[in-house]
Amino acid sequence: MTRDQLQSVHDDIAYMRAMAQEGRRAPLLGGSILIAAGAIFGSASVVHFAVESGALDLPPVAYAWLWGAAFLMFIVALNVLQHRIGKLPGAASLANRAAGAAWMGVGLVIFTASISMAVLAWKSGAETTFMLFPSLIFAVYGAGWAVSATVSGVRWQWWLAVAAWIAAPGIAFLAGEPTLWLAYAAGLFAFAMLPGFQLVRQRTSLVV
């Protein structure tokens, strides 16, 4: 291999290293989506608790309308926010693309699991199927934060992942109680909305 070829290989390696370092320094940009998810579904969970506890006198069909409306609100917010995020500096970085793919996977797991549980509840006539839903959400949120922590190198996201995994079986002890949905709301605020605010704050401070 000639000296010029060796220099070319060295330059390529240096370029790839610089790109990887730049990708790791780029702030994660999905905070606003996490805020929307935590706020919308967390609020829906509080209303669910109010209906199930009797604080709101509504028929059982209200649950379907409640969660259906929350889902539609989130889809609208998701489309708007993704369009805005795509225009931000660092959106094409390796870390953001990897984290974005991981959270997209989390969302698809939640969506397909929701459909599967609805079908199972319809076939069996047992609405208790949905009592597993909060545990499932916390488990996949833990996976999302684990991937995000790995690609970004941000240590506090690992603590979120572990906390979500601990909360997944822990919240199952509340199955059959109205407080299940209040605890679920608290988890959504803790594992989505509040960390989302932290990501937005970090992005803003780096830009400024």
Image (spheres, rainbow, N blue to C red):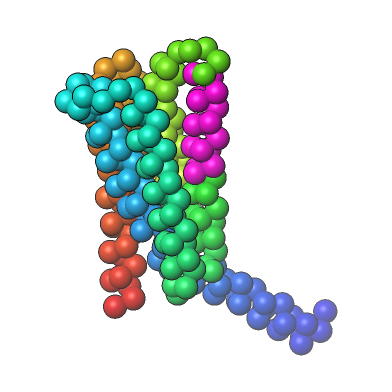
- In the image, 126 versus 28, the foreground residue is 126
Residue, x 52% and y 49% (percent of image)? 104
Residue 72 seen in the current view = yes
Quadrant of the image containing the N terminus: bottom right
Residue 190 seen in the current view = no
Q: In the rendered view, would you say 174 is above or below 108?
A: above
Q: Position of residue 203 (x, y in %)?
A: 34, 67
Q: In the rendered view, would you say 114 is above or below 201?
A: above
Residue, x 29% and y 47% (percent of image)? 39
Q: Residue 4: which quarter of the image?
A: bottom right
Q: Position of residue 51 (x, y in %)?
A: 24, 26
Residue at the extreme bottom of the image, as rendered: 4
Residue, x 53% and y 31% (percent of image)? 115
Residue, x 47% and y 58% (percent of image)? 79
Side of 53 where 17 appears, left or right: right
Q: Is residue 118 magenta?
A: yes
The secondary structure making up most of the magenta span is: helix
Q: Position of residue 154 (x, y in %)?
A: 38, 55
Quadrant of the image containing the C terminus: bottom left
| Residue stretch in magenta | 106-121
Residue at the extreme right of the image, as rendered: 1
- In the image, 20 versus 69, the foreground residue is 69
Q: Is residue 107 magenta?
A: yes
Q: Position of residue 10 (x, y in %)?
A: 67, 78
